[in-house]
Amino acid sequence: MKLKDIYKFFIKEGIEADPRGINIVEMDLSKRKTEYNGLSDQKKENYDIESLTNPYYDSRVLFGDQNADIKTVMAGIDIETQEILLAKQLINLGTKIDLIIAHHPEGYAYSTFYGVLGMQADILNKQGVPINITEKIVSERMKEVQRSVLPQNNERVFDAAKLLNIPLMTAHTVADNHVAIFLQNVIDALRPLYLKEIIELLNKYPEYQHASKIAHTPLILNGSDYSRCGKVFVDMTGGTEGPVESFEKLSAAGVGTIVVMHLSSKALKEAEKHRINIILAGHISSDNLGLNLLFDKLEKNFGELKLIECSGFRRFRR
């Protein structure tokens, strides 16, 4: 398969798995096109044209010939300069590597990933929080994340890949959409009464089984084994952790339990304040599940890839 085939397929599948629904994604893309068409020719020169068809700023080809043939991929959760150097060393030792796929964004995909947070407004709205409220609290969170990104030296990994001539792409929200919708669907089908049932469900999947072996087991952060779940919300996509103000609104909307990848101490205190049960599924394990679901689809359509695991990624085929 070609690099462009992988990229386009990831974006297509990311859209189909988007918890907002395809109609909302199409509305978002249409709004961007209207904005672009209204710009002067000078401003159009610097516009991110790719964002007119790819709604996920954090999932991009950072370096490489789009027509390159891809047979062997080195995939990792975090790809930084040391992983690029590792790939080069493996190549020097005779291992063929056609492409590196990073889950977490780097380079331009990191500089702009705060834009993905906008999807959280519609995700929260689907849980029953009014859209006028979600848009305002998410907008403030986007500005906060943008401010944290601006001072960073974001091109180091891109520069390393370019200097060593190794194609590099990122697959962040396209994978996170998959784990969010997958777990939401299986939990909805289970209709758990108690929190322990969700923990038991997670531990049936190899990604969480592997994590448990290295002391990263899913756990209950707020609540107990026999706390009743109520309405369960799987919150695992949209760039990064959402606004802490959302817990009050979700509680008022009737959400009883939230299943997350990770949660800050500040957010946990807010969840406790509003009596929302919290299950921490696990960060890297959930990232692995999302990537594996995406790779399963890719291989079903294009044939099996040779995958080299690194930086916390473990391939489990279904």
Image: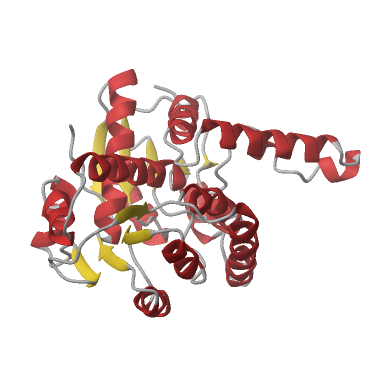
Q: Is residue 203 above or below residue 31?
A: below
Q: Residue at x 62, y 72 (%)?
A: 151
Q: At which x and y percent is residue 288?
A: 27, 48
Count of number-bearing discs: 0
User: What is the image's colouring?
Assistant: secondary structure
14 vs 203, left or right, is: right
Q: Nearer the viewer, residue 28 or 196?
A: 196
Q: At which x and y percent is residue 314?
A: 21, 47
Q: Is residue 150 above or below residue 26?
A: below
Q: At which x and y percent is residue 89?
A: 30, 51
The reply to whether residue 91 is visible in this rendering is no
Q: Nearer the viewer, residue 41 or 137?
A: 137
Of all residues, the one furthest to the left in this rendering is 213
317 vs 252, left or right, is: left
The quadrant where residue 271 appears: bottom left
Q: Residue at x 75, y 44 (%)?
A: 47
Q: At which x and y percent is residue 112?
A: 61, 55
Q: Residue at x 57, y 31 (%)?
A: 23
Image quadrant in which the N terminus is located? top left
Image quadrant in which the C terminus is located? top left
Q: Nearer the viewer, residue 60 or 39?
A: 39
The reply to whether residue 265 is visible in this rendering is yes
